[in-house]
Image: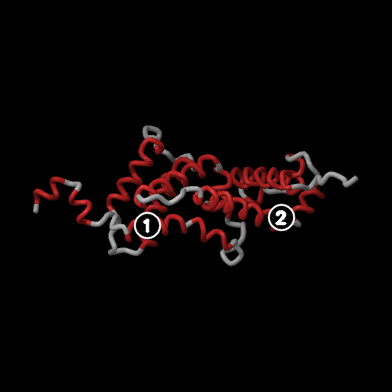
Amino acid sequence: MAKPKTHDEALRLRLLHRAAATVFDRGTAALSLRQLAADAKTSTTAVYSLFGNKAGLLSGLYQEAVRLFVERLAAIRPTDDPAADVIRIGLAYREYAVANPHLYAILFSDRGAQCPSDADRPREVVETYRPLIEAVSRGQRAGQFTSDSTPEVIALSVWGTAHGLVSLVLSGNEPSELAVADCYERALQALVTGWREPAESDASNPEATDAT
């Protein structure tokens, strides 16, 4: 009878998420394989068996953060309204960050500075940006977005807005009298409106029509 596998995927994920919490709270320098093993109620042998060393653990940590982020954004299926899809992707971005603040920090904050360099980052990281660019491209073909800018530029402005608002919350810098959650979707909608074709924006604005 085969012995049960103790160093399994469940243990690997448990170690990764505990490591992510440590990096988020205190940075990569505070990450100790011995302490991580103790926190996860396993042995250092198990940690070395699964990751090899600290560098391997950090690499695995980054890859897991990317995998979950790609999976969440890819779940937003295209519809016949690309502009609405852009907003839905922005909402999914925030949902991932709020649900996984430790992993989000590994992806986008300086707490992940000692994770893999750009040359070593998994190819999948490109996929985090692709759904947004594709939605904008579809919107341009449908006449929803201006053709004066590339899809990459428009997508970057949406990405930057989402990242900035989310980062205010996760960094604890959200203004006490304001709630990002209350304005987040409206901010995305305003941005999408600003990138629409001028004729489409004017048609929905009676004042602009009267002025002509």
Q: Say which of marks 2 and 1 sits in front.
A: 1
Dot 1 surroundings within 10 Å: few (below 14), some, or many (20 or more)? many
Q: Which residue is painted at 54% across and 40% down in the image? A: 99
* Residue that carries the numbered disc 1 in the rendered image: 136
Q: Position of residue 159 (x, y in %)?
A: 42, 53
Q: Is residue 27 above or below residue 153?
A: above
Q: Quadrant of residue 52?
A: bottom right
* Residue that carries the numbered disc 2 in the rendered image: 54
Quadrant holding the C terminus: bottom left
Circles 2 and 1, Cβ within 8 Å, touching? The answer is no
In the image shown, does 148 or 161 lie closer to the viewer?
148
Dot 2 surroundings within 10 Å: few (below 14), some, or many (20 or more)? some
Q: Position of residue 122 (x, y in %)?
A: 60, 61
| Secondary structure found at label 1 | helix
Q: Position of residue 111 (x, y in %)?
A: 57, 51
Quadrant holding the N terminus: top right
Position of 162 with respect to 208 (left or right) is right
**Callout 1, which amino acid?**
Val
Q: Is residue 112 above or below residue 40?
A: below
| Secondary structure found at label 2 | helix
The residue positioned farthest toward the right in the image shown: 1
Q: Which residue is painted at 14% across and 45% down in the image? A: 206
Q: Position of residue 2 (x, y in %)?
A: 88, 47
